[in-house]
Image (cartoon, rainbow, N blue to C red):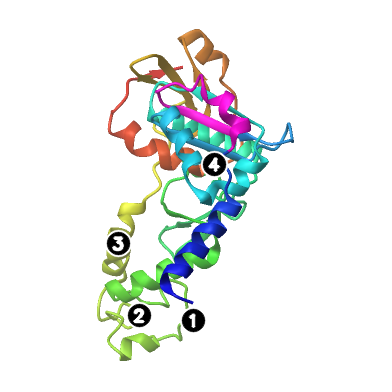
Amino acid sequence: MSRRATTHRLEFDAAAIYEYPEHLRQWLEGLPNQPGVYTFHGESETMPLYIGKSINLRTRVMSHFRTTDEAKMLRLARRISWIPTAGDLGALLLEAQMIKTQQPLFNKRLRKNRQLCSLQIGSDKPQVVYAKELDFSHSPDLYGLFRSRRAALETLKSLADEHQLCHGLLGLESLSAGRPCFRAALKRCAGACCGKETREAHHARLIAALEHVRVVCWPWQGPVGLVEQGKLQTQIHVIDHWFYLGSVDNIDEARSLKRAPEGFDHDGYKILCRPLLAGQYPVLPL
Protein backbone atom coordinates (compact mmCIF):
# COMPACT_ATOMS: atom_id res chain seq x y z
CA MET A 1 0.00 0.00 0.00
CA SER A 2 1.42 3.38 -0.98
CA ARG A 3 2.19 6.08 1.57
CA ARG A 4 -0.55 8.26 0.08
CA ALA A 5 -3.08 5.44 0.37
CA THR A 6 -2.04 4.76 3.96
CA THR A 7 -2.47 8.42 4.89
CA HIS A 8 -5.89 8.46 3.22
CA ARG A 9 -6.89 5.31 5.17
CA LEU A 10 -5.86 6.89 8.50
CA GLU A 11 -7.81 10.05 7.71
CA PHE A 12 -10.87 7.97 6.77
CA ASP A 13 -10.68 5.95 10.00
CA ALA A 14 -10.41 9.11 12.11
CA ALA A 15 -13.38 10.62 10.32
CA ALA A 16 -15.38 7.45 10.88
CA ILE A 17 -14.66 7.59 14.61
CA TYR A 18 -15.03 11.32 15.13
CA GLU A 19 -18.20 13.23 14.43
CA TYR A 20 -18.70 16.84 15.44
CA PRO A 21 -21.03 16.81 18.49
CA GLU A 22 -23.80 19.04 17.18
CA HIS A 23 -26.01 17.95 20.09
CA LEU A 24 -23.71 19.87 22.46
CA ARG A 25 -23.60 23.13 20.50
CA GLN A 26 -26.38 24.71 22.57
CA TRP A 27 -24.29 24.36 25.72
CA LEU A 28 -21.46 26.46 24.29
CA GLU A 29 -23.39 29.70 23.93
CA GLY A 30 -23.01 30.94 27.49
CA LEU A 31 -19.44 29.84 28.15
CA PRO A 32 -17.52 32.78 29.66
CA ASN A 33 -13.96 33.86 28.95
CA GLN A 34 -12.87 33.54 32.58
CA PRO A 35 -11.32 30.96 34.92
CA GLY A 36 -13.38 28.11 36.26
CA VAL A 37 -14.26 24.43 36.28
CA TYR A 38 -16.35 22.69 33.62
CA THR A 39 -18.10 19.31 33.53
CA PHE A 40 -19.18 17.07 30.66
CA HIS A 41 -22.29 15.14 31.75
CA GLY A 42 -23.63 11.92 30.27
CA GLU A 43 -26.83 10.04 31.00
CA SER A 44 -25.98 9.59 34.69
CA GLU A 45 -26.99 12.35 37.08
CA THR A 46 -24.47 11.24 39.71
CA MET A 47 -21.32 10.32 37.75
CA PRO A 48 -20.06 12.91 35.25
CA LEU A 49 -17.94 11.98 32.26
CA TYR A 50 -15.14 14.51 32.66
CA ILE A 51 -14.21 17.43 34.92
CA GLY A 52 -11.55 19.97 33.95
CA LYS A 53 -10.39 23.48 34.75
CA SER A 54 -8.98 26.40 32.82
CA ILE A 55 -8.07 30.06 33.10
CA ASN A 56 -10.43 30.52 30.12
CA LEU A 57 -13.49 28.27 30.21
CA ARG A 58 -14.67 29.01 26.68
CA THR A 59 -11.31 28.39 25.03
CA ARG A 60 -10.67 25.17 26.94
CA VAL A 61 -14.11 23.62 26.42
CA MET A 62 -14.04 24.47 22.72
CA SER A 63 -10.66 22.71 22.42
CA HIS A 64 -12.36 19.41 23.28
CA PHE A 65 -14.38 19.74 20.06
CA ARG A 66 -11.33 19.95 17.83
CA THR A 67 -9.65 16.60 18.43
CA THR A 68 -10.49 13.01 17.53
CA ASP A 69 -9.01 11.89 20.87
CA GLU A 70 -12.16 13.13 22.60
CA ALA A 71 -14.56 11.26 20.27
CA LYS A 72 -15.78 8.65 22.75
CA MET A 73 -16.38 11.12 25.55
CA LEU A 74 -18.15 13.60 23.26
CA ARG A 75 -20.47 10.92 21.90
CA LEU A 76 -21.53 10.02 25.44
CA ALA A 77 -21.92 13.64 26.58
CA ARG A 78 -25.41 15.12 26.85
CA ARG A 79 -24.75 18.52 28.39
CA ILE A 80 -21.99 20.78 29.74
CA SER A 81 -22.01 22.79 32.96
CA TRP A 82 -19.45 25.16 34.44
CA ILE A 83 -18.62 27.09 37.61
CA PRO A 84 -16.68 30.37 37.20
CA THR A 85 -13.93 31.16 39.72
CA ALA A 86 -11.96 34.29 40.58
CA GLY A 87 -8.71 32.85 39.27
CA ASP A 88 -6.58 29.83 38.55
CA LEU A 89 -6.06 28.92 42.22
CA GLY A 90 -9.78 28.64 42.86
CA ALA A 91 -10.17 26.56 39.71
CA LEU A 92 -7.40 24.18 40.80
CA LEU A 93 -8.94 23.71 44.25
CA LEU A 94 -12.48 23.22 42.97
CA GLU A 95 -11.40 20.81 40.23
CA ALA A 96 -9.51 18.62 42.71
CA GLN A 97 -12.45 18.60 45.12
CA MET A 98 -15.02 17.77 42.44
CA ILE A 99 -12.96 14.96 40.91
CA LYS A 100 -12.47 13.30 44.30
CA THR A 101 -16.12 13.57 45.32
CA GLN A 102 -17.75 12.82 41.95
CA GLN A 103 -15.24 10.34 40.43
CA PRO A 104 -15.81 11.22 36.74
CA LEU A 105 -15.46 8.40 34.26
CA PHE A 106 -12.72 9.89 32.05
CA ASN A 107 -10.51 11.46 34.77
CA LYS A 108 -7.56 9.29 35.75
CA ARG A 109 -5.93 11.45 38.41
CA LEU A 110 -6.64 13.02 41.79
CA ARG A 111 -8.33 9.89 43.08
CA LYS A 112 -8.24 9.40 46.85
CA ASN A 113 -5.10 7.52 47.85
CA ARG A 114 -5.68 5.42 50.96
CA GLN A 115 -2.01 4.40 51.13
CA LEU A 116 -0.59 7.94 51.30
CA CYS A 117 2.48 7.82 53.49
CA SER A 118 5.53 9.81 54.54
CA LEU A 119 8.94 9.29 56.11
CA GLN A 120 9.12 10.29 59.76
CA ILE A 121 12.69 11.05 60.77
CA GLY A 122 13.41 11.04 64.49
CA SER A 123 16.61 10.19 66.33
CA ASP A 124 16.36 6.55 65.27
CA LYS A 125 15.82 4.92 61.86
CA PRO A 126 13.33 6.51 59.43
CA GLN A 127 9.81 5.16 59.78
CA VAL A 128 7.13 4.93 57.10
CA VAL A 129 3.92 6.42 58.54
CA TYR A 130 0.46 6.61 56.99
CA ALA A 131 -1.95 9.54 56.67
CA LYS A 132 -4.85 7.31 57.69
CA GLU A 133 -3.16 6.78 61.08
CA LEU A 134 -1.38 10.10 61.66
CA ASP A 135 -2.48 13.68 61.01
CA PHE A 136 0.17 14.93 58.61
CA SER A 137 -1.06 18.52 58.89
CA HIS A 138 0.46 19.03 62.36
CA SER A 139 2.98 16.18 62.75
CA PRO A 140 6.60 17.42 62.73
CA ASP A 141 9.60 15.69 61.15
CA LEU A 142 7.74 14.31 58.13
CA TYR A 143 9.50 14.21 54.76
CA GLY A 144 7.92 13.50 51.41
CA LEU A 145 4.43 12.38 50.42
CA PHE A 146 4.35 8.98 48.76
CA ARG A 147 1.63 6.84 47.21
CA SER A 148 2.96 3.64 48.77
CA ARG A 149 5.47 2.24 51.25
CA ARG A 150 7.49 0.92 48.33
CA ALA A 151 7.80 4.41 46.83
CA ALA A 152 9.01 5.79 50.18
CA LEU A 153 11.66 3.08 50.54
CA GLU A 154 12.80 3.53 46.95
CA THR A 155 13.38 7.21 47.71
CA LEU A 156 15.54 6.26 50.70
CA LYS A 157 17.57 3.90 48.50
CA SER A 158 18.11 6.63 45.92
CA LEU A 159 19.26 9.06 48.60
CA ALA A 160 21.61 6.43 49.99
CA ASP A 161 23.25 6.03 46.58
CA GLU A 162 23.52 9.77 46.03
CA HIS A 163 24.82 10.72 49.48
CA GLN A 164 26.69 7.58 50.62
CA LEU A 165 24.18 6.86 53.36
CA CYS A 166 24.13 3.57 55.24
CA HIS A 167 21.37 1.08 54.41
CA GLY A 168 21.62 -0.30 57.95
CA LEU A 169 21.09 3.04 59.64
CA LEU A 170 18.23 3.77 57.23
CA GLY A 171 16.52 0.51 58.20
CA LEU A 172 16.88 -0.94 54.71
CA GLU A 173 19.02 -3.90 55.86
CA SER A 174 20.09 -5.54 59.10
CA LEU A 175 23.43 -4.67 60.69
CA SER A 176 25.63 -7.07 62.64
CA ALA A 177 27.11 -5.61 65.81
CA GLY A 178 30.60 -4.24 65.22
CA ARG A 179 30.61 -5.03 61.51
CA PRO A 180 30.26 -2.59 58.62
CA CYS A 181 27.39 -2.89 56.18
CA PHE A 182 27.89 -4.55 52.81
CA ARG A 183 27.91 -1.23 50.97
CA ALA A 184 30.75 0.12 53.14
CA ALA A 185 33.17 -2.36 51.56
CA LEU A 186 32.12 -1.07 48.15
CA LYS A 187 32.69 2.53 49.29
CA ARG A 188 29.02 3.28 48.69
CA CYS A 189 28.51 4.01 52.40
CA ALA A 190 30.60 6.67 54.16
CA GLY A 191 31.02 4.39 57.16
CA ALA A 192 28.66 5.59 59.87
CA CYS A 193 27.99 1.91 60.59
CA CYS A 194 31.64 1.25 61.46
CA GLY A 195 32.87 4.50 63.00
CA LYS A 196 34.37 6.16 59.93
CA GLU A 197 31.90 9.00 60.40
CA THR A 198 29.66 9.86 63.32
CA ARG A 199 26.05 8.87 63.33
CA GLU A 200 25.24 12.52 63.96
CA ALA A 201 26.97 13.49 60.71
CA HIS A 202 25.11 10.73 58.88
CA HIS A 203 21.80 11.94 60.30
CA ALA A 204 22.56 15.54 59.35
CA ARG A 205 23.28 14.53 55.73
CA LEU A 206 20.04 12.56 55.60
CA ILE A 207 18.01 15.54 56.84
CA ALA A 208 19.78 17.90 54.42
CA ALA A 209 19.00 15.57 51.53
CA LEU A 210 15.31 15.44 52.50
CA GLU A 211 14.84 19.09 53.45
CA HIS A 212 13.33 20.07 50.09
CA VAL A 213 10.46 17.62 50.63
CA ARG A 214 9.77 18.41 54.30
CA VAL A 215 6.01 18.36 54.96
CA VAL A 216 5.05 21.77 56.32
CA CYS A 217 2.80 21.76 59.37
CA TRP A 218 -0.31 23.91 59.18
CA PRO A 219 0.96 27.32 60.38
CA TRP A 220 -2.34 28.63 61.82
CA GLN A 221 -4.37 27.54 64.82
CA GLY A 222 -7.54 27.03 62.81
CA PRO A 223 -9.10 27.69 59.41
CA VAL A 224 -8.22 30.69 57.26
CA GLY A 225 -9.74 32.46 54.29
CA LEU A 226 -7.44 32.96 51.32
CA VAL A 227 -8.54 35.94 49.21
CA GLU A 228 -8.22 35.62 45.43
CA GLN A 229 -9.17 38.69 43.43
CA GLY A 230 -9.93 38.28 39.73
CA LYS A 231 -11.05 40.62 36.98
CA LEU A 232 -14.71 39.66 37.31
CA GLN A 233 -15.06 38.44 40.89
CA THR A 234 -13.34 38.00 44.24
CA GLN A 235 -13.48 34.78 46.23
CA ILE A 236 -12.47 33.66 49.69
CA HIS A 237 -11.12 30.12 49.65
CA VAL A 238 -11.61 28.52 53.07
CA ILE A 239 -8.74 26.24 54.10
CA ASP A 240 -8.35 24.25 57.32
CA HIS A 241 -5.13 22.26 57.92
CA TRP A 242 -4.48 22.18 54.13
CA PHE A 243 -8.02 20.87 53.59
CA TYR A 244 -10.07 22.87 51.07
CA LEU A 245 -13.59 23.46 52.41
CA GLY A 246 -15.00 25.63 49.63
CA SER A 247 -15.06 29.13 48.14
CA VAL A 248 -17.43 31.95 49.09
CA ASP A 249 -17.99 35.62 48.36
CA ASN A 250 -17.81 37.19 51.84
CA ILE A 251 -16.31 36.67 55.28
CA ASP A 252 -19.59 35.68 56.95
CA GLU A 253 -20.07 32.82 54.50
CA ALA A 254 -16.44 31.84 55.03
CA ARG A 255 -16.97 31.43 58.78
CA SER A 256 -20.00 29.23 58.16
CA LEU A 257 -17.84 26.72 56.27
CA LYS A 258 -15.67 25.92 59.27
CA ARG A 259 -15.68 22.25 60.18
CA ALA A 260 -13.23 19.56 61.20
CA PRO A 261 -11.60 18.17 58.04
CA GLU A 262 -11.25 14.41 57.67
CA GLY A 263 -7.82 13.08 56.83
CA PHE A 264 -4.98 14.84 55.03
CA ASP A 265 -5.80 16.56 51.75
CA HIS A 266 -2.77 15.71 49.62
CA ASP A 267 -4.03 17.66 46.61
CA GLY A 268 -4.90 20.68 48.73
CA TYR A 269 -1.43 20.63 50.24
CA LYS A 270 0.28 20.46 46.83
CA ILE A 271 -1.83 23.29 45.44
CA LEU A 272 -1.74 25.59 48.47
CA CYS A 273 1.56 25.16 50.30
CA ARG A 274 3.78 27.31 48.11
CA PRO A 275 1.39 30.23 47.41
CA LEU A 276 0.23 30.40 51.04
CA LEU A 277 3.71 30.40 52.55
CA ALA A 278 5.00 32.80 49.89
CA GLY A 279 2.31 35.32 50.81
CA GLN A 280 0.91 35.49 47.28
CA TYR A 281 -2.65 36.00 48.58
CA PRO A 282 -4.12 37.88 51.57
CA VAL A 283 -5.00 35.48 54.41
CA LEU A 284 -7.88 36.07 56.86
CA PRO A 285 -7.82 34.02 60.09
CA LEU A 286 -11.31 32.68 60.79
Say what amino acid the circle numbered 2 marks.
Cys
Label 4 Cα crowd, 10 Å radius (few <14 / some 14-19 / many 20+): some
Crowd class of label 1 (few under 14; some 14 to 19; many from 20; radius 10 Å): few
Q: Residues within 10 Å of mark 2 (few under 14, many from 20)?
A: many
- Quarter where residue 224 is shown: top left
Q: What is the magenta range?
A: 21-39
Residue drawn at (46%, 17%), measured in percent from left and top?
A: 286
22 within the magenta span = yes
Q: Is residue 85 above or below residue 2?
A: above
CA distance separating discs 1 and 3: 22 Å
Picture coordinates of residue 82, whole percent (x, y): 54, 25
First reached walking from the N terminus: tag 3 or tag 4: 3
Cα separation between marks 2 and 1:
11 Å
Please state the horizontal and vertical placement of residue 49, each as a whole percent of the image: 64, 40
Distance CA(mark 3)–CA(mark 2): 19 Å
For this view, does 281 lie left or right of residue 96? left
| Residue 28 on the magenta segment | yes
Q: Residue 109 at what x, y percent from top left?
A: 54, 49
